[in-house]
Image (cartoon, rainbow, N blue to C red):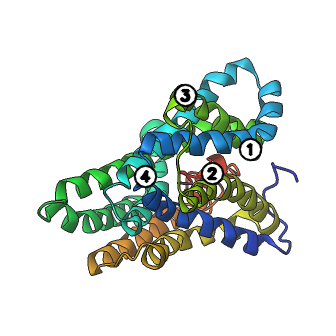
Amino acid sequence: MDERATGTKVRPGGVGAGLIAVCLWGLAPVATRSLVSELAPLPLLTLRQLLAAGVLLPWAVPALRRMDARDLPRLIAAGLLGMVGYNLPVTVGLQWLPASSAGLLLATEPVWVLVIGLVFLAERAGLRIVLGTGVALAGVAVIAGPAALSPGSGTRAAAGAALVLLATLAFGGYTVVLRPLSEKYGPVSATAASSVAGALPYLALVGTIWPPRLSPPAWGEMLFLALGSTVAGMLLWNRAIVRGGSTRISRLLYLEPVVSVLGAMVFLGERATAAVLAGGVLVIAGVLVTGDSRGEALGVHDRSSGLVATTTKTDERSTANGPAGAV
C-alpha cells in the first residue's frame, strides 16, 4: 500500500473500511466512559497506550530509522500533543460527562484545526469559516450549558466538557505539527512513530497497572480501545482513503458523533436530551459549513491515517492515532 496515495482512483472496499473505522472511533467514548468506572484515568491510559504502541512498533521502527534528526523534536511534540494532550483530558473528562455529549463535542476537532491554522499559520478566515466556527461553538454551549447550570453535578459536567474541548484543541495542534512529517515520511509511518513517541511518558506509570486487575468485560473494553479504536481504526481508515479517495471517504466522519450517541444509548443506557441533540445538530452543521468553505475538500487528513492536505477533520484522522483517539 502506498502511504502517499491521494485516493484519486476509486476502488472497491473503501467505503466499507471507512465505515468500520468511523464506528470504531465513534464507540471509543462509550468504551472509555464505561471503563473509567472500574479503572482510574491514568492507569487506563497507560495500559491502552502501551498496548497500542506495542502493536504499532513494526510501523514505527522503520520510520524512526530513516527519520532526519532535525525532525525528531517535531515528532516528539506531535506525540505528546496526541497521546497525552488529547487522550488524557478526554479520559478524565469522561468520568463526569456522558459519552453522547463527549462524542458530539469531539466533532468540533476540525474547527479547532482551522482556528490554529488562522492563528499560527497566518491563514485567512473567510466569512463561512467565521460563521461555521460560530455555529459549532453555539452547539457546544447548548450541549454543555444545561449540565453546567444544573445543581449538584453541574460543576463536574462543566469541567468534563471543558476537558474534552481542551483535548480537541490539543488534537488540532497535533494535526498541524505532524502534517509536515506525514508529507515527508508517509501518513502511516508518521502516525505510528508519533504514537510510539507519545506513549513513552506512560512507561513511568507502569507501576500503576501491574498487575492489571480488570474484570473480563473491562478487558474487552480495553482491548477495543487499544487495538480496535487506535490500531485497527488507523489501518482501516488509511485503506479507505487510498481505495476510495480522501474527499469521498472523509464525509463518513460526520457519522462518528451519531455512532457515539447511539452507542451511549444502547450500551450505557444514556438518554439523549433535546439540548444534546440540538447542540449536536449545530456542531455538525458548523463543521460542515467550515469545512465546505475551503476548496481543500473536507478530509484530506484524518486522525488515524493521515493523508496530507488541509486543515479539516479528515486530515486529523490521517495524522493522528485516534483521539484517541481516536479517542
Most foreground residue, 100 or 5:
100
Q: CA distance from mark 1 to mark 4?
A: 40 Å
The residue beneath circle 2 is 226
Tell me: residue 137, above or below residue 265: above
Q: Amino acid at mark 4?
A: Ala
Residue 157: horizontal and vertical position, in percent?
25, 58
Percent position of residue 49, x then y: 59, 42
Q: Are marks 4 and 3 in contact (CB under 8 Å)?
A: no
3D distance between C-alphas at marks 3 and 2: 17 Å
| Residue 182 appears in the figure | no
CA–CA distance in space, label 2 to label 1: 9 Å
Q: Given contact means CB atoms under 8 Å apart, are the residues at marks 3 and 2 in contact?
A: no
Can you say whether 83 is above or below 313 in the image? above
Relative vertical location of residue 200 with respect to residue 257 in this rendering, above or below: above
Q: Which mark is residue 201?
A: 3
> Would you say the residues marked 2 and 1 are in contact, meaning their CB atoms lie under 8 Å apart?
yes
Residue identified by numbered label 1? 55
Would you call the spot at circle 2 few (<14 residues within 10 Å), some (14-19), or many (20 or more)? many
Q: Earlier in the sequence, mark 2 or mark 1?
A: 1
At horizontal 78% and vertical 70% (from top left) the residue drawn is: 14
* Mark 2 or mark 4, whichever is nearer to me: 2
How many C-alpha atoms fall within 10 Å of the one at disc 3: few (<14), some, or many (≥20)?
some
Amino acid type of the residue tagged 2 in the rendering:
Ala
Q: Residue at x 68, y 24 (%)?
A: 71
